[in-house]
């Protein structure tokens, strides 16, 4: 059966998944977008599930190139993005999870994008994958919502930026890749799922944030990926 592709933006977001899989010993080659892909098999409830996991880098362009490469090279039956995000919802807290029901770009005039590709003002995770993720989170005892995620090519770290993002998108969480993953997946008619564990309240200067140990939150999202994949 076709594999499941798993993408993170940072090393920490893929570390837990990589530890359980055999490492590909191949260094990046010409034509593979500079990516090192970790391949392996997990024991699922319905038999073995193959995975192809990689760290794509931060921001929409890095992750668009990564998503397209994985789709071309591995023909995955689903693409799952696993990572952290800034919280914008007062009812949620650090280490809760937002599933990307709706994904909206922050810095793109979608009227123009949708003019060349109608129906692409916003993007969505696959309903079946969302259901599976919600059930898995329930059984893990992790608070979560299926919500709106805003994706932009900048870090949100001030009340002014929070107000702007909320006003533009009504989002529950903000990050830098989710809409691009779902955008590329939709172009290729591949089901996608964006999982975000909350790492901050979008009020921490990036220079401070980058020194934080985010592995606890990244691992929350990654454990969820493994739980979902076992049921696929
Ligand atoms: N990823 C994690 N926290 C974030 C934030 N505050 N802004 C953008 N991306 C993030």
Image (cartoon, rainbow, N blue to C red):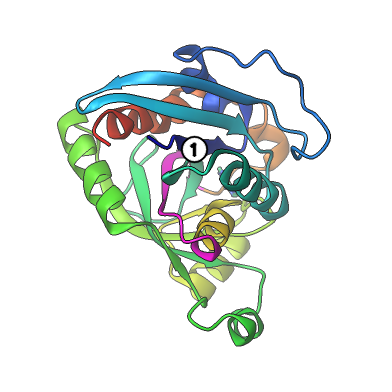
| The quadrant where residue 173 appears | bottom left
Along the line of sight, which residue is nearer the eye, 213 or 139? 139
> Looking at the image, is 117 positioned above or below residue 173?
below
The residue lying at 43 percent from left, 25 percent from top is 219
Residue 74 within the magenta-colored segment of the rendering: no
Residue 188 within the magenta-colored segment of the rendering: yes
| The quadrant where residue 232 appears | top left
Task: Name the spot of residue 147 as percent of width and height, x first.
Answer: 34, 59
Q: Name the residue under label 1.
A: 5
Residue that extends furthest to the right in the rendered view of this protein: 30
Residue 91 visible in the shown view: no
Q: How crowded is mark 1: few (under 14 residues within 10 Å), some or many (20 or more)?
A: many
The residue stretch that appears in magenta: 186-201
The residue lying at 46 percent from left, 61 percent from top is 189
Task: Name the spot of residue 180 as percent of width and height, x first.
Answer: 59, 58
Task: Name the spot of residue 42 as percent of width and height, x first.
Answer: 36, 19
The residue lying at 49 percent from left, 36 percent from top is 6
> Looking at the image, is 68 positioned above or below residue 137?
below
> Looking at the image, is 186 positioned above or below residue 85?
below
């Amino acid at each position: 059966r076709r594999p499941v592709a798993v993408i993170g933006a940072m090393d920490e977001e893929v570390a837990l998944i990589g530890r359980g899989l055999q490492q590909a010993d191949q260094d990046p080659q010409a034509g593979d977008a500079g990516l090192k892909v970790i391949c392996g098999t997990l024991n699922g409830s319905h038999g073995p599930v193959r995975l192809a996991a990689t760290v794509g880098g931060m921001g929409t362009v890095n992750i668009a190139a990564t998503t397209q490469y994985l789709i071309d090279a591995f023909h995955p039956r689903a693409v799952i993005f696993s990572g952290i995000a800034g919280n914008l919802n007062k009812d949620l807290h650090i280490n809760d999870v937002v599933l990307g029901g709706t994904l909206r770009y922050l810095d793109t005039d979608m009227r123009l994008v949708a003019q060349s590709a109608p129906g692409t003002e916003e993007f969505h995770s696959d309903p079946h994958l969302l259901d599976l993720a919600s059930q898995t989170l329930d059984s893990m005892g992790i608070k979560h919502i299926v919500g709106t995620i805003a994706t932009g090519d900048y870090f949100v770290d001030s009340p002014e930026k929070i107000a702007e993002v909320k006003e533009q998108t009504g989002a529950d969480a903000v990050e830098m890749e989710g809409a691009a993953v779902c955008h590329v997946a939709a172009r290729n008619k591949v089901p996608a799922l964006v999982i975000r564990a909350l790492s901050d309240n979008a009020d921490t200067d990036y220079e401070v944030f980058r020194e934080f140990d985010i592995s606890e939150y990244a691992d929350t999202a990654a454990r969820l990926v493994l739980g979902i994949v076992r049921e696929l």
